[in-house]
Image: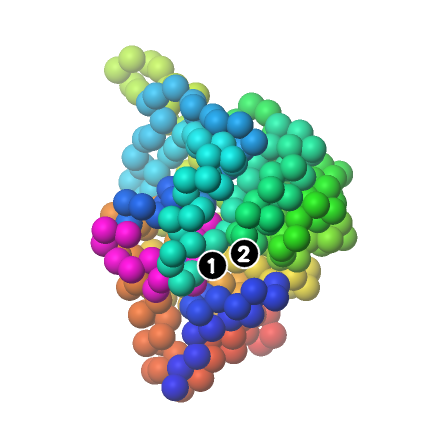
Amino acid sequence: MTDLSVNFAGVTFKTPVVMASGTFGFGREYAEYFDLSKLGGIAVKGLTLKERLGNPPPRIAETPMGILNSVGLQNPGVDAFITRELPYLKQFDTNIIANISGNTVDEYAEMAEKLSEAGVDMIEVNISCPNVKAGGIAFGTSCDGAAAVTRAVKDRAKVPVMVKLSPNVTDIVSIARAAQNAGADALSLINTLLGMRINIETHRPVLANKTGGLSGPAVFPVALRMVYEVAAAVPLPILGMGGISTGEDAVEMLLAGADMVAVGTAIFNDPLAPIAITAGIKAYLSRKNITSVTELTGRVIRS
């Protein structure tokens, strides 16, 4: 029998497929399409200490191989999430990962304490959002910034802490090592790549924010390379993401060194994509006579 379960930083996931933060909201819309209990986990929409309205529209632009977005962390705030959304999500048999983003180190720490006491299974520290002027990527582009946030969150969190890394740096491995040395329990990568589109009729940027984060199939080779590099250098479990659209993509990501995978933009084309990707992983394992998905992790590094 094929075993899809993964022990990830001390938390057991029934499958290695989770939903990427920022693409799945709080799950309500997608519960109309499939049972959310079939997911390994859900990384909820990025939370801030207070409600955020996000960036002005237009905030989304299509590209030939993905989406450019500058939503800007629109969310109801951490207290509203705990009161209104977490009880809804807890009715499903899946792990809840709270993605947090702060303007200051103290904001990150305060949110981590609140959310872990409220019963989430893991904290994902977003130091990599390219669409906000304060916080986010400002902490994720330097080793000192990444370490300061990680250390503060670890001091207050009562559940495992995963740090989400940005690809918009010259050396992602050094940022990963800084997070590890500051106590991170796991890493997730990659966030979106900073990009831009221009309307040639108006001679203006398509996005009101001018630039945005590129996701989707176009970024998959970049994400795969960065997961491979970080997995080879840092001994922490990795949630790999970035353009995963098929079971075969997920298998590649696992072979590159990820312990689990997150699905994001693919769900905009096919709401059932995470179910198909899970089935694709299982079919691959069966075809290769591999009994546990954990046997795939990092095989390319070890070969």
Q: Mark 2 touching mark 1, by CB under 8 A? A: yes
Q: Which mark is residue 42?
A: none
Would you say 246 lies left or right of 184 here? Answer: left
Q: Nearer the viewer, residue 289 or 15?
A: 15
Quarter that holds the N terminus:
bottom left
Local SS, label 2:
loop
Q: Residue at x 64, y 32 (%)?
A: 107
Residue type, numbered disc 2:
Asp
Give residue 18's position: percent from left, percent from top.
Answer: 43, 57
Disc 2 and disc 1: Cα gap in Å?
6 Å
Give the amino acid type for the residue marked by disc 1 in the picture. Answer: Asn
Q: Which residue lies furthest to the top in this view?
A: 202
* x, y percent for residue 110: 65, 37
The part of the chain drawn in magenta is 31-43
Q: Is residue 298 visible?
A: yes
Is 273 magenta? The answer is no
From where the camera sits, is residue 170 visible?
Answer: no
Q: Which badge, 2 or 1, comes first in the chain's sequence?
A: 1
Count of picture labels: 2
Residue underneath mark 1: 95
Residue highlighted by disc 2? 121
Task: Give the color scheme: rainbow, by chain, secondary structure or one colour.
Answer: rainbow
Q: What element carries label 1?
A: strand
Q: Where is residue 9 in the image (x, y as percent from the top left)?
A: 61, 63
Which residue appears at 33% of the width and 58% of the height?
A: 36
